[in-house]
Amino acid sequence: MTFREKLAKGPVLFDGAMGTYFAEKYDREIKACELANLNAPQDVLRVHREYIRAGCNCIKTNTFGANPLSLECTLVEALQVIDAGWNLACQATDGTDVCVFADLGPVPQGEAEDYYPLLDRFLSLGAENFLFETFSSAEILPNLTAYVKERKSEAFILTSFAVMPDGFSRLGEPASRLYTAMQRDGNTDAVGFNCVSGPSHLRKLISTLPKGKKPLSVMPNAGYPSLVGGRTYYGNSTSYYAQIISSLCSEGAGIVGGCCGTNPEHIAHCREALRELSASDTPNASASSAAQTQALPNRLWDKLSRGEKVVAVELDPPANSDIRAFLSGAEALQKAGADAITIADCPVSRARADSSILACKLHRELGIDPIPHLTCRDRNINATKALLLGLNIEGVNNVLVVTGDPVPSAEREAIKSVYNFNSPRLAGFIRDLTPELSNGPFRVYAALNINAQNFDAHINYARRKIESGVSCFLTQPVHSALALENLKRAHEELDAKILGGIMPIVSYRNAQYMTGEIAGIHVCDEIVERYRDLDREQASELAVTITTAIAAHMLDYVDGYYMITPFMRTDLTTQILKNVRDLF
């Protein structure tokens, strides 16, 4: 009987986890469970047969991580693992009606081309059913499903995503978008979720999804693990697990099974629960209801929306806990007419006071509209979401997303970067978080480098950011004719607000340093030379003159200004700010 024929008769039950059960059963850790296909084939075979005796309709080949990157081996060696895994699964199902699924998980940082040799091997072995499981993004899956169907049109393809209890993948993709994308993919036959989340959380997640035309697959973890003596253990509430699986089937799931922490006992209880499932039960998947939000006023964005020009001024956060100068500077800028204060997030990878905490303090104590910078470097998805929820609670609903400067090479062993996001993906994550926000949506700002020689690439990247939810760009400072031309082009081509960057130069040495060592900033030779041999007072006067003139040249191409305060020289910035206000 083919898998499609099984599916037509009612819910289909897959096996449970190979990796966690293999480690538990044989009480040993190995480099990768897939290597046991070659090093301990009889042990793998016994696990397959236990799941079959427990009552599953399908088993997965022990090839989830059978790729050169995951196994740290050559392609030839990875294909040998696939050969052995396929043969063991076929041997285990010989003489039964159990189907075999060729199983592949995500290749670390892999492109679609990295999967093709693996799929070719499965196809040459006679695989008819394919499972792409534990993916965090749908980006390359349509390429993989099309590749298989072009070579075997009758193949059955199941795609499955790993999402956390909050409904997002580790890359910040919402479950609803992943689910919808593969429902629309013409080569995918079934779509669902597995891993990371326990049964109750996946059940809750499924209840929020729109009803799709393709069969739904749900294969949760046994629950959530504990670490005991350096080993990972899962609870063993098999009856509870089976109860949730049964309810999922009664609510519309057509394919069920187990992921990490599940064992043959879980599957046996699931089989019994499915037998007891009344034939009169009808699918009743509930529709999602978006959380009602009561938006707080966003004064900064409201002004931009009305077409009023605004000025946002950047202040560097302090490197210690003494924030007197920071607060007094922010207050002086507010009195001089600043509409917002932007706060960098550990610039150049050096620890400073947290930008978001400072933003909340400014908003609460001084009534200033802050724009904290959020980097992709120092927080994983959980920390990022927690921070965003905290900002929303405080009414801080403007954020600037940046990838973040890399950690200097000499410190990389001691300081680890975290890049779950790039800036477009982080912007999309913030946009998709809106249903969970009770104090209104975020407005997302991003950087635009108008000093780039190859501005085409930056324009295209900016368009990607806009598609991800960016509403406004803050540009690098203008100190050259090229930067001004690029700013004009951005104004014409980008469907977003633009705050043009202006930054006073305080000395000849400062001008040389900015153009020679700060990425994304270029000061033309003419401006550099005008500072030669000037004392502090003369240089300050020239800074006010030049910066005001640059702002005037930019006026018709911007929705406001982004002023950067050098060396905490708020006295200088306030003078320029007053001049800029007069331009409006």
Image (spheres, rainbow, N blue to C red):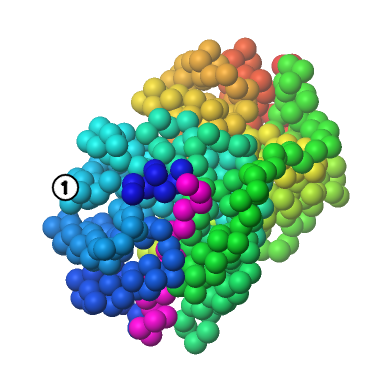
Q: Secondary structure at mark 1?
A: helix
- Indicate whether 2 appears above or below 486: below
- Where's residue 174, x and y in %? 57, 43
The outermost residue toward the left is 76
Q: Would residue 428 be visible to someone looking at this image?
A: no
Number of on-image labels: 1
Q: Would residue 492 be visible to someone looking at this image?
A: yes
Tell which of 84 and 335 is nearer to you: 84
- Indicate whether 516 appears above or below 481: below
The outermost residue toward the bottom is 229
- Please name the residue shown 74% across and 53% down the image: 390
Q: Amino acid at mark 1?
A: Ser
* Magenta-span inclusion, residue 19: yes
Tell which of 513 and 443 is nearer to you: 443
- Near mark 1 (Cα within 10 A), the count class, few <14, some 14-19 or many ≥20, is few
181 relative to 357 in the view: left or right:
left
Tell which of 471 and 271 is nearer to you: 271
- Please name the residue shown 16% across and 47% down the image: 124
- Where's residue 80, x and y in %? 16, 61
Q: Which residue is mark 1?
A: 124
- Please name the residue shown 63% across and 23% down the image: 497
The quarter of the picture where residue 529 lies is: top left
- Where's residue 185, x and y in %? 43, 32
* Magenta-span inclusion, residue 548: no
Tell which of 59 and 287 is nearer to you: 59
79 relative to 464 in the view: left or right:
left
121 relative to 51 in the view: left or right:
left
What range is drawn magenta here? Answer: 9-27
- Please name the residue shown 55% across and 27% down the image: 466
Q: Quadrant of the C terminus?
A: top right
